[in-house]
C-alpha cells in the first residue's frame, strides 16, 4: 500500500486538520507516514499545501515527486488546479467547489469549471453547505475528508475512528457532529 | 518512551527534554519556532522547570545558553539561519572558550526562502567556528542526534551545531523516543577563568587548543554512525549526499543504489570515507541542501584530479531547496508529468489579515506621504513587510531585523526628508533599540513608527519582549516624551493619525509614533482559549 496525497488550500482554511486525522488513522494502522507542512509567511492568506505520504514500506522523501500524487484534496478549487503537475495519470482530485477570492484576477467560475471538466477523476462538492446541513460550518474540512475517503488507502471505519480520537477531548457532541459531516461528505461524493 | 508522530522541530525538542535539558533559549523564527514552543507546552518540561521563556534576540539567547552551560547544565539554543548572524559574536567565541554542560545550537535554514530574506547555508558558520556539526536526514535521526548530542558536546568540550532545513523542521514522521535522563547538577568549570576570560593571552592558548581538537573532531566524524558508506556496482560515479538529500536520492532508486554512495550527516567531513569514494569512483556527484559547501571543499582551488558534479557545474540548480525531481534530473532520470498547471491559475501571495492594525497604519501613512514626494519608508522584518505588496506598496526597503531605524538614520544623514522607519514591536526590542539610541545621540531628523500589535505575529503570536513598556523604553533611551505619540490604528481615527504623522514629520528631530492595537490572530486565539 502506498498513497501520495497533496492537501491544498488558502492559508487559514485549515488543511492541516485533515492531515492530522489521516495521520492519526495511519499511525494506528502501523503505516509509515511522512507529511511536509507549510508554516510561516504563506499562512497569511497565501496558497498553502501539504505533502502527505502513506505506505506499508519505509518512505524516503518527504516531498512527492511530480506525477506521483494519487490524490489531491483541496479546500479551494483554484488551489486544487495549482498542484495538477503532481497528480498521477489516473489520480483523483477532490475539491471544494467554492472559490476563496482574495486576489484581484481570480478566474471566472466557468473557466474553473472547464478546467475541472478536463480531468478524468474528480469530485467537486460545495462542502460548506453540506457541513451546514450536518450541523456546523466548521466541519467543512471533515466533509472534504469524507469525500476523499475512498481514495486514501485507509478503510472508512479507521478514518472515522481517527476523527473520534482527534475530537474526543472536545466532547461526544462534537465527535458525533464531525462523524455526521464525514458520512455526508462520503455519501454525496458517491452519488456524484 | 514510545512512538510518536513528530515534526522535525518537535523531535529535536523532545530529544532535548529526554537528554536532561535544563534550558532552551531562542527568538522565534521560521522554521525553528516549534522547537521552543514544544518545550513551552510540554508537561514534563513544566514539571521540571526547564527554562523556556523567549529571549529578546538570538544573541541574548546564545549568551544565556552559554551561561547555562557554564553552570554545568545542558542548554539548547535555537534560531532560524539569519538569526545566526545576530548571534555570531557569541557563537564564534563559544568555540574558543568551549563549554561545560553540553550545549547544542540549532540552526534552521530556509533554502528556497519560504519565509526568509536569504537562503544562507549555516554549515559555513560551523566550519568558520571549527566546531562539530550534525545534519539529520530523518526525524528519527534528528531525535537521536540531539539525544546523544549533549553527551558528545561534553565529551569533546565544545558546542555542537545541529543544522536542519525547512523540510526537516516542518515535516512529520514517526519517531521512537528513549528513556528520560536526569539533568546535570549545578557545577561551574574548575578551569573556568583559563577558558572563559578571552583576554588575548588566554584566547591564543584556547584557539591553539581548538586547532588541536580538529583531529579529534575528524576521527569522531569518521567513526560516526551518521556517516555511512554504501557500495554500488557501477563505479563510474560516486555520490555524496548530506542531510535530507539522501532521501531524495533513495526516492530515485527504490531498488537500491547502482553507484557507491557516501551519506554524510556529521561534520567535519569524514576524510577516510571521502578518500575511499574518490579512489573507487571515476567521478563524484554531490547532492546537498543549501550552498555547495561540500562540493567547494572537494574541488578546492587545485581540484582533486577527479570531476566533481553538483551545484557549481549546473548538474543541480545553483539555488533553492532540493526536491526528488531536482535530484532525479541530476541523475538523468525522466520527469513524469501528466497534467500542467492551467493558465487561469493565478498567484496568491500572502497578505495582511483583514482587520489588521498594520493596514490602518499604512493607509494613514501613505495618505500623508503623498504630500512629500521625496519621502522614503524603511521597512523591517515581520507581518508588516507585507505592506510592500499591493494595495499598499508602502515601504522602500526591508533588509534585516532592526535595519529600518538605522537605514532611515543613514538616509536622513545623507539628506533624505522625510525619512520614515516602520518597525514592529518585537523587532524593535530584538534589535531596533540600539539604533534608536544612535538617532537620539545625534538628534537625527527621523520618524520611527513602532507598529505595535503586542505580539510576535508572523511566527504565530509568541510573546513580544517589550509589551506594555515601549513608551518607557523609548523615553529611557532619550526620546523627548512630547514626541512619543501613541495612537489606535482604526479607520475612525484616520484624521487624528494623519495629523500626528504630519506634525511629527515637521518636527526636526527624533519622533516615535506608536500605533497600538492587538493582533487579530492573537485576539481570536485568546477568545478560543477562554471558551475552552
Image (cartoon, grey):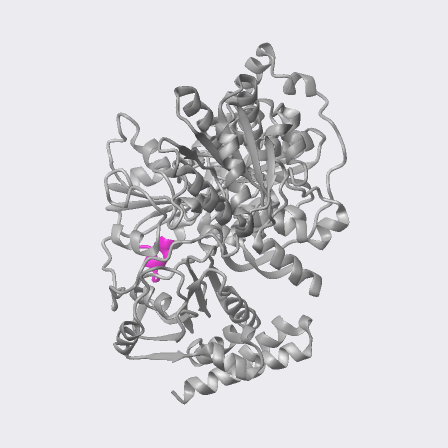
Q: Residue at x 30, y 56 (%)?
A: B325
Residue B297 locus on image (x, y percent): 35, 31
Q: Is residue A115 above or below residue B36?
A: below
Query: Observer-nearest residue: B366 or B91?
Result: B366
Q: Residue at x 32, y 46 (%)?
A: B239
Span colored in magenta: B248-258
Query: Observer-nearest residue: B502 or A39?
Result: B502
Quadrant placement of the N terminus of chain B: bottom right
Q: Is residue B179 above or below residue B472?
A: below
Taking the view exactly as shown, the residue that stands out farthest to the bottom is A191
Q: Residue at x 44, y 81 (%)?
A: A150
Left or right of B197? Residue B448 is left
Left or right of B357? Residue A64 is left
Residue B415 locus on image (x, y percent): 39, 21
**Number of numbered tags placed on the structure image:** 0
Q: Is residue B278 above or below residue A59?
A: above
- Is residue B189 something that shows in the picture? yes
Residue A61 locus on image (x, y percent): 40, 58
Query: Observer-nearest residue: B521 or B162?
Result: B521
- Is residue B226 something that shows in the picture? no
Quadrant placement of the C terminus of chain B: bottom right
Left or right of B464? Residue B415 is left
Task: Please tell me whether residue B193 belongs to the stretch shown in magenta.
Answer: no
Q: Is residue B232 above or below residue B278?
A: below
Task: Please tell me whether residue B250 belongs to the stretch shown in magenta.
Answer: yes
Residue B479 locus on image (x, y percent): 61, 25
Amino acid at each position: 500500500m502506498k498513497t501520495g496525497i497533496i492537501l491544498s488550500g488558502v492559508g487559514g482554511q485549515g488543511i492541516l486538520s485533515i492531515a492530522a486525522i489521516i495521520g492519526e488513522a495511519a499511525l494506528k494502522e502501523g503505516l509509515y507516514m511522512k507529511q511536509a507542512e507549510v508554516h510561516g509567511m504563506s499562512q497569511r492568506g497565501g496558497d498553502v499545501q501539504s505533502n502527505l505520504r502513506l505506505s506499508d514500506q519505509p518512505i524516503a522523501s518527504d516531498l512527492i515527486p511530480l506525477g506521483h500524487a494519487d490524490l489531491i484534496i483541496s479546500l479551494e478549487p483554484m488551489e486544487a488546479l495549482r498542484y495538477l503537475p503532481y497528480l498521477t495519470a489516473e489520480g483523483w482530485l477532490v475539491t471544494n467547489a467554492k472559490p476563496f477570492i482574495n486576489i484581484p484576477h481570480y478566474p471566472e467560475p466557468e473557466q474553473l469549471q472547464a478546467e475541472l471538466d478536463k480531468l478524468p477523476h474528480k469530485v467537486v462538492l460545495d462542502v460548506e453547505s453540506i457541513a451546514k446541513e450536518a450541523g456546523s460550518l466548521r466541519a467543512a474540512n471533515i466533509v472534504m475528508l469524507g469525500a476523499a475517503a475512498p481514495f486514501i488507502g485507509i478503510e472508512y471505519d479507521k478514518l472515522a475512528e481517527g476523527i473520534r480520537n482527534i475530537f474526543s477531548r472536545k466532547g461526544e457532541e462534537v465527535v458525533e457532529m464531525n462523524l455526521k459531516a464525514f458520512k455526508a461528505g462520503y455519501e454525496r461524493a458517491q452519488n456524484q | 518512551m514510545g512512538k510518536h508522530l513528530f515534526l522535525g522541530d518537535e523531535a529535536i525538542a523532545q530529544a532535548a527534554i529526554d537528554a536532561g535539558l535544563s534550558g532552551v533559549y531562542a527568538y522565534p523564527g521560521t522554521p525553528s519556532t516549534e522547537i521552543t514552543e514544544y518545550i513551552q507546552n510540554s508537561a514534563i518540561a513544566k514539571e521540571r522547570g526547564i527554562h523556556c521563556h523567549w529571549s529578546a534576540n538570538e544573541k541574548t539567547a546564545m549568551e544565556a545558553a552559554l551561561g547555562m552551560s557554564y553552570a554545568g547544565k545542558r542548554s539548547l539554543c535555537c534560531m532560524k539561519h539569519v538569526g545566526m548572524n545576530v548571534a555570531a559574536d557569541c557563537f564564534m567565541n563559544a568555540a574558543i572558550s568551549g563549554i561545560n554542560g553540553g550545549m547544542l545550537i540549532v540552526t534552521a535554514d530556509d533554502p528556497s526562502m519560504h519565509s526568509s530574506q536569504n537562503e544562507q547555508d549555516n554549515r559555513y558558520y560551523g566550519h568558520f567556528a571549527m566546531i562539530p556539526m550534525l545534519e539529520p536526514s530523518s526525524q528519527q535521526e534528528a531525535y537521536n542526534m540531539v539525544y546523544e548530542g549533549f553527551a558528545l558536546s561534553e565529551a569533546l568540550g565544545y558546542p555542537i551545531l545541529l543544522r536542519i532545513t525547512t523540510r526537516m523542521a516542518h515535516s512529520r514522521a514517526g519517531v521512537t523516543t528513549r528513556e528520560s535522563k536526569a539533568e546535570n547538577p549545578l557545577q561551574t568549570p574548575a578551569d573556568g577563568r583559563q577558558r572563559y576570560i578571552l583576554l588575548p593571552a588566554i584566547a591564543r592558548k584556547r584557539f591553539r587548543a581548538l586547532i588541536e581538537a580538529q583531529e579529534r573532531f575528524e576521527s569522531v566524524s569518521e567513526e560516526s554512525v551518521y556517516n555511512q558508506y554504501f557500495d554500488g556496482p557501477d563505479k563510474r560515479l560516486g555520490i555524496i549526499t548530506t542531510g535530507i538529500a539522501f532521501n531524495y536520492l533513495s526516492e530515485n532508486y527504490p531498488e537500491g543504489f547502482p553507484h557507491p554512495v557516501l551519506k554524510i550527516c556529521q561534520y567535519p567531513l569524514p576524510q577516510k570515507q571521502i578518500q575511499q569514494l574518490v579512489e573507487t569512483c571515476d567521478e563524484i556527484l554531490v547532492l546537498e541542501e543549501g550552498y555547495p559547501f561540500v562540493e567547494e571543499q572537494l574541488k578546492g582551488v587545485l581540484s582533486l584530479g577527479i570531476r566533481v558534479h553538483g551545484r557549481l557545474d549546473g548538474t543541480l540548480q545553483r539555488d533553492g531547496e532540493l526536491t526528488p525531481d531536482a535530484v532525479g534530473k541530476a541523475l538523468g532520470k525522466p520527469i513524469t508529468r501528466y497534467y500542467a498547471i492551467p493558465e487561469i491559475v493565478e498567484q496568491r501571495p500572502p497578505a495582511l489579515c483583514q482587520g489588521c492594525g498594520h493596514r490602518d497604519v499604512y493607509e494613514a501613512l501613505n495618505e500623508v506621504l503623498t504630500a512629500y514626494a521625496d519621502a522614503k519608508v524603511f521597512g523591517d522584518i515581520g507581518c508588516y513587510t507585507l505592506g510592500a505588496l499591493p494595495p499598499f506598496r508602502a515601504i522602500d526597503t526591508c533588509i534585516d531585523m532592526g535595519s529600518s531605524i538605522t537605514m532611515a538614520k543613514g538616509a536622513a544623514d545623507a539628506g533624505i526628508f522625510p525619512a520614515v522607519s516602520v518597525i514592529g514591536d518585537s523587532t524593535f526590542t530584538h534589535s531596533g533599540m540600539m539604533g534608536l539610541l544612535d538617532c537620539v545621540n545625534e538628534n537625527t531628523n527621523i520618524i520611527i513608527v513602532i507598529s505595535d500589535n503586542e505580539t510576535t505575529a508572523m511566527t504565530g503570536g509568541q510573546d513580544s519582549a517589550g509589551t506594555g513598556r515601549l513608551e518607557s523604553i523609548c523615553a529611557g533611551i532619550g526620546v523627548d516624551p512630547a514626541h512619543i505619540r501613541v495612537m489606535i490604528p482604526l479607520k475612525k481615527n484616520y484624521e487624528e493619525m494623519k495629523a500626528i504623522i504630519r506634525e511629527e514629520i515637521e518636527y526636526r528631530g527624533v519622533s516615535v509614533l506608536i500605533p497600538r492595537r492587538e493582533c487579530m490572530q492573537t485576539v481570536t486565539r485568546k477568545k478560543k482559549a477562554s471558551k475552552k
